Image (cartoon, coloured by chain):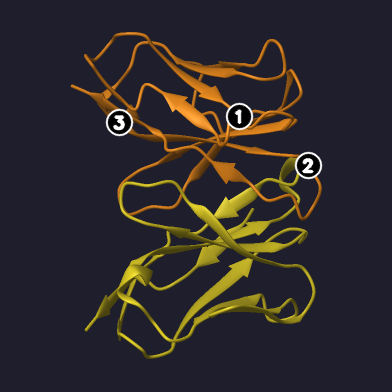
Chain colours: A yellow, B orange
Amino acid sequence: GQNIDQPTEMTATEGAIVQINCTYQTSGFNGLFWYQQHAGEAPTFLSYNVLDGLEEKGRFSSFLSRSKGYSYLLLKELQMKDSASYLCAVRGSRGGSYIPTFGRGTSLIVHP
Amino acid sequence: GAGVSQTPSNKVTEKGKYVELRCDPISGHTALYWYRQSLGQGPEFLIYFQGTGAADDSGLPNDRFFAVRPEGSVSTLKIQRTERGDSAVYLCASSLTLGARAEQFFGPGTRLTVL
């Protein structure tokens, strides 16, 4: 089976940096995704990691360590609009297929 | 269309009724996924299609749930004898392929409320 763990809620100040962690246990591994979901809206893709290391994309970076079953999403220069839920999703080998399994999401609150 | 669309956006029904939820994927996307999301939870996988066939339906909770994609494009999720526990947002996503890096594009969801 697959198990994904991330904090339920985090708060941060506008302009600051925040790191959202995700740990996972999975049978087989075929990539890890981060999605952003604003309240009442659909998830939107942020990043994908399949090899160890850091992937940087503008204000957002994502890190992966496969040996530790660990990833983090780093958000820099926080803006109020970054208040949202951040979903970690792992693509394992569920039943021979490669369906992403989602964590329950981390609700990030950015305050002035 | 420009993105994944789902209809209706909201559906209120009574316990025991039958409902159909529709998903129009991005044109040309061969893979289509259904998830459901309860408040405060991440999306929970239900079923996915590669073309017309259901390649993995292991997430369907029981035999009241069924989905079809007869022509490899539009998909319909069907729920029989709805129960209050079925209330959730039903999300549809599509991807160009089933490749490992394939990004899923989500629709806005259908909020189902069973009274």
Number of marks in picture: 3
Q: Quadrant of the C terminus of chain B?
A: top left
Q: Report x, y in % for residue B91.
A: 47, 36
Mark 2 and mark 1 lie on one chain; the one further toward the N terminus is 1
Q: SS class of the residue under badge 3?
A: loop
The CA distance from mark 2 to mark 3 is 29 Å
Q: Report x, y in % for residue A18.
A: 43, 85
Callout 1 touching callout 3 (CB < 8 Å): no
Mark 2 and mark 3 lie on one chain; the one further toward the N terminus is 3
Callout 2 touching callout 3 (CB < 8 Å): no
Q: SS class of the residue under badge 2?
A: loop
Observer-side mark, 2 or 1, equals 1
Q: Which residue bears the numbered disc 1? A: B25
Q: Mark 1 Cα within 10 Å, few/some/many (few <14, many 20+)?
A: many
Residues at discs 2 and 1 both on one chain: yes
Label ID, residue A37: none
Label ID, residue B98: 2
Is B17 positioned to the left or the right of A90 in the image?
left
Q: Which residue bears the numbered disc 3? A: B87
Residue depicted at x 62% and y 57%: A2
Chain to which mark 1 belongs? B
Is B96 positioned to the left or the right of B46 in the image?
right
Residues at discs 1 and 3 both on one chain: yes
Q: SS class of the residue under badge 1?
A: loop
Chain to which mark 2 belongs? B
The CA distance from mark 2 to mark 1 is 14 Å
